Amino acid sequence: MRRYALIAVPYLWLLALFLIPFLIVVKISLSDTEVSIPPYTPTLDLSGGWQSVKDFFAALDFENFVFLTTDDLYWKAYLSSLKIAAISTVLTLIVGYPIAYGMARAEESWRPTLLMLVILPFWTSFLIRVYAWMGILSNEGYLNQLLLSLGLIGEPLTILNTNTAVYIGIVYTYLPFMILPIYATLERMDGSLLEAAEDLGCSRSGAFWLVTMPLSRPGIIAGCFLVFIPSLGEFVIPSLLGGSRTLMIGKVLWEEFFSNRDWPVASAVAVILLLILIIPIILFQRNEQKQREMDQ
Amino acid sequence: MKSTLAPLAAIVLAATTAQAEEVRVYNWSDYIDEALLDKFEAETGIDLIYDVFDSNEVLETKMLAGGSGYDVVVPSGTFLQRQISAGAFQPLDFSKLPNAVNLWDVIKSRTEQYDPGNAHAINYMWGTTGIGANVGKVAEALGPDAPLNSLELVFNPANMEKLASCGVHFLDAPAELIPAALKYIGEDPDSHDPDVIAKAEGVLSAVAPYVQKFHSSEYINALANGDICVAIGWSGDVLQARDRAAEADNGVEIVYNAPVEGALMWFDMMAIPADAPNPDAAHVFLNFIMDAHNMADASNYVYYANGNLASQEFLVEDVIGDPAIYPDKATLENLYTTTPYSAKVQRVVTRLWTKIKSGT
């Protein structure tokens, strides 16, 4: 009994904070817009009894999902978001892995301090940090001033309001999410495994690629998920650092919601976005599980 | 039992009275003299919580979602009209607004098209959408005869190509830029016909590559600092940039012009949401704003014209005497207004705007 109660806690959490809100979004995605509060119809009115519940379900349809296929804006935005999220994840991994490796290899007395330094940026609001990047990257910003004064460039580089700025923003913002899981797996790694590899004639770099890398795989996977998923739907970074040509699904969603006041279509866009995220994750996890069973 | 209930009752009472002495106002950014906010609190003893936004869309979404918690909000005319039809606002109780006698008939007759009988809202400020320019930089790029007061400056690709390097910002407001583009090619700016609206795309797409940013508030600082040389913006915002530049004494000279082809005239209206927690305090706030002195102070600070006739004698010459703020008769006749798009047309407009901005 106690065991069930314990298991129930995370499931209740999932139900209340994920499944119910998701079902509400699905419901709105099947509705139609209307000039009213809230701006869609039908709304469920339980006072009319069973008949009104039946009417409610009868009024729902998939029209909005069909609409999404009629305009290439949507799939272009999904694809462009996938591309930006994938590239940013790879960049974050390239930057984050050496940092995590260095931290795990540092003296034990240093590690808490290093860990603290990784977490430190979270003490300032995310929005303020992105604004700070605007000051760094703008044409008159610190970066250009530095490069100009060093004589490395003749005229200011245009970085702000381009995709480059979006990549910088995402890599900067999500770097701790990459470092922490990788650090956790590397720190737990048994150092004697490396010694054994070297004793058996493996070079240092060989030992890294054959032993360290495969053992840190769970950390890499966790880090990549933690970076990829939020950057796919990112809205703040592209709207502050990106230009008008930065096409991301988060911005399309914003426009459906705010400019068109079309909550149903906005919800349909959100449902598809969630499916794009969830289906590969489920397939991936199933694959992992199969592999684990095979290993045993 | 009694002894535990009594303090509880006292707390509940205190809580309800505390709530009655609070008013939450949601207004546009850079749109009031902050001294007025302190004055309101001192005069009325009501706590004022003042938040800001920079797009009608954000406000409208809050209104349509309901339960925004605000007591006074400031949508523009076309947005006001749609939100009234959605039932978002309560009719004003004019018995609580004795200062309403100060309102200006000329403006009231124009805002009536959005709010029949002016029953739901009072005019706060009004202005035009036009062109702000850095005189020196534009002359550098285009020569001394640059058409600073014409849409030619921003809608002619030949001019925009030369201006691109010194920086151009457009408002991120399709409902204002598309009418301007239509006016430029001689169409009805208030057209709701998708085929006519589509013609605006040609004009705007041709110049969009030269636009550094589509944004509705950054251009104030960017103009004032000399980071950009031209902005399509709102009259008072450009004039605020002019004054900030003058204060900073950085050699930047900004001018505002309502285009000679005709300019959009808009009205920002103060209204009370239907579900406002403190409608009484909201009325006190509206009445305070309609006081001739207070309204004049606000206009003197933000450089926008207001809909308050009695305030005009307290306006400084810089405001009342500036035709960019209070246009002369001829300009006033050249101003046009627009009406809200239906949901279907709105979708066409938004899609067109995305295409213009992103090329997709």
Image (cartoon, rainbow, N blue to C red):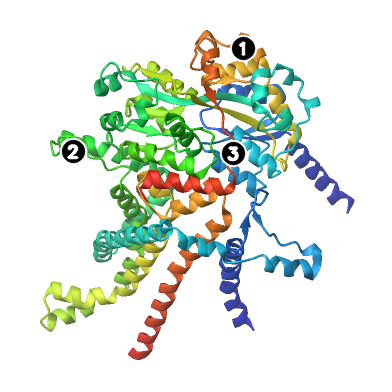
Secondary structure beneath disc 1?
Answer: helix
Callout 1 environment at 10 Å: few (<14), some (14 to 19), or many (20+)?
A: many
Secondary structure beneath disc 2?
Answer: helix
Callout 3 environment at 10 Å: few (<14), some (14 to 19), or many (20+)?
A: some
Q: Please give the chain letter of the residue carrying mark 1.
A: B
Residue farthest to the right, as pictured = B2
Observer-nearest of B146 and B296: B146
Whether residue A140 appears in this view of the structure is: yes
Report, in whole angstroms, how far the alpha carbon at label 3 lies from the one at label 2. 49 Å
Residue occupying image coordinates x 49% and y 34%: B179
Residue designated by label 1: B312
**x, y percentage for residue B174?**
48, 39
Q: Is residue B323 above or below residue A139?
A: above
Compared across the picture, whether A91 is left or right of B341 comes to: left
Q: Label 1 is placed on what type of residue?
A: Gln
Residue designated by label 2: A147
Q: Label 2 is placed on what type of residue?
A: Leu
Residue occupying image coordinates x 64% and y 66%: A60
Mark nearest the camera among 2 and 1 is: 1
Q: Which circle marks residue B258 in the picture?
A: none
Whether residue A124 appears in this view of the structure is: no
Quarter of the image for residue B247 reads top left
Query: Cβ–Cβ below 8 Å for labels 1 and 3?
Result: no
Q: Label 3 is placed on what type of residue?
A: Pro
Q: Is residue A26 above or below residue A153?
A: below
Q: Is tag 1's residue or tag 3's residue first in the polypeptide sequence?
A: 1
Residue designated by label 3: B340
Image quadrant containing the N terminus of chain B: bottom right
